Image (spheres, coloured by chain):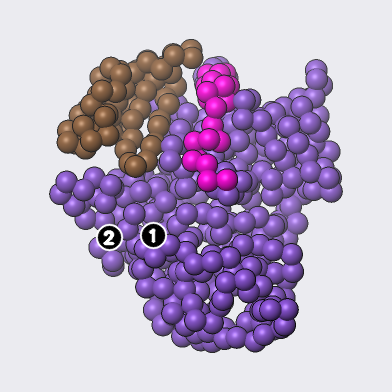
Chain colours: A purple, B brown
Amino acid sequence: MAGVDLATFQFDPLLAWSVFFMNGDKTIYGRFGTSSPQAKRDRLDSNRNHTVAGLKAAMRQALAVHKSYADDPATWRPRLAGKTGAKPLWRFAEKTPAARKYGRLKRVKGQHVESCLHCHEVQRTAIDSYFMTNKPLPDRMLWMYPHPAVVGVTLSKLHSSRVTRVAPDSAASVAGLRVDDDIVSFRGQPLLSVADFQWVLHNAPDDGGTIPLQVKRGEEMVSLTLKLAPLWRRAGDFGWRYRVAGYAAWLWGGVTLVDAPGGVRVAGRSPHWFKRPNRSARRALQRGDLIVAVDGKSDWTRSTYLAYLMREKKLGSTVKVVVMRNGKRTPVAFRMPKTRPEVQGH
Amino acid sequence: MRISIALALTLVLVGLSGADGNTKLRAFLNDDKVPEGWIYEDIDAGYAAAQKSGKPLLVSFRCVP
């Protein structure tokens, strides 16, 4: 990603493959490529979220949008404006403060993998650089590119934007979305693929709001409104993202955490290759522990726990945790690291 | 992460000859065998070609494994 202009090319950094459909004037028609916590959990490569049929559908849609844009640019320019992201804090990943400080991005002769600035490192360098500003990380930087399941929608891998499932009592259900609806526009933007749905969610305010939807239902066009609750992103999970594991090592010693009824379960130890694990946390937490309270608060998920430590705890401070261990509520404590994590290699 | 660009013509990817990237890296990635017509690591050439032809761009990012 070195040299890639992030003012134009913003996409889910976890992807092993990502596509943009564009006009030569740099107007973006849409994106293709998605990953999901389900795929990660099932140890599937992110490309398993893609199908040739889905790519063909996205290409057909791109060609249709291209024609519409050429025929009526005055109407389509504002519809497509939101496809380009807001000005990034750092336009080039290799020029972020973290990348400069840690000197990670030097080319290593003959080591192509190590020399590459990987997509997932764009996320790491951005988060590490934001850390260096000493401001709390916004939800958007952690719960990024939310999966449609966060609002209760499952979209077909074979079509551009066909609804295959609506979760009961979800935001999508309340909005009135139905199975077999084709989403024609989302916040006014045409959808080429699931990635475009995620793009709109990614750019929605952290504190909620409404997003207009237009769907084709049979021969009928239906207008709907999707309501996002305050802190809606936190219903999702970002702990599955590959690069987040490095923060887990830094924060709690590299133990593996999974969401469980009543709290967060310590499932085991993460691989040894994480750098600088937090030994204090590693000693405090044991395999099988169920974290039920942190600093006097309960109702944690893996993601909210990780976000709390990353954003609200001071370096070197003490984290007081209550775990269920052998059937008993057991208080334990560990110290936060004294320094920020360094950008790690591949 | 390498970048390659092609022009979409109906549903077929058609590209243009383009700037050469790092030869050794391309060989490592087997990208020295990319179909003729893809533009490799030269987005500006892609924009120019798309504007000249009036066709849309397909820009592909893929991970160096």
Assign the C terminus of chain A to one quadrant of the image: bottom left
Q: Is residue B48 left or right of residue A195?
A: left
Task: From this view, report whether residue A67 is shown above or below residue A183.
Answer: above
Q: Is residue A202 above or below residue A247?
A: above
> Measured from the top left, where is residue A329 in percent x and y?
71, 83
Question: Which of the 4 image quarters holds residue B23?
Answer: top left
Residue A256: horizontal and vertical position, in percent?
Answer: 54, 65
Whether residue A304 is visible, yes or no, is no
Residue at image coords 76%, 36%: A165
Magenta residues (range)? A42-65
Residue A128, by quadrant, is: bottom left
- In the rendered structure, are the residues bearing label 2 and label 1 in contact, judged by CB atoms less than 8 Å apart? yes
The residue that appears at 57% across and 45% down in the rendered structure is A42
Q: Chain of mark 1?
A: A
Residue found at the far front of this picture: A326
Checking the image for residue A125, the label placed there is 1
Q: Amino acid at mark 1?
A: Thr
Q: Going by the image, does A132 lie left or right of A158? A: left
Q: Magenta includes A205?
A: no
In depth, the one of A19 and A165 nearer the eye is A165
The answer to whether one can see residue A338 in this image is yes
Q: Which residue is mark 2?
A: A104
Kind of residue indicated by mark 2: Arg
Q: Residue at x 45, y 57 (%)?
A: A243
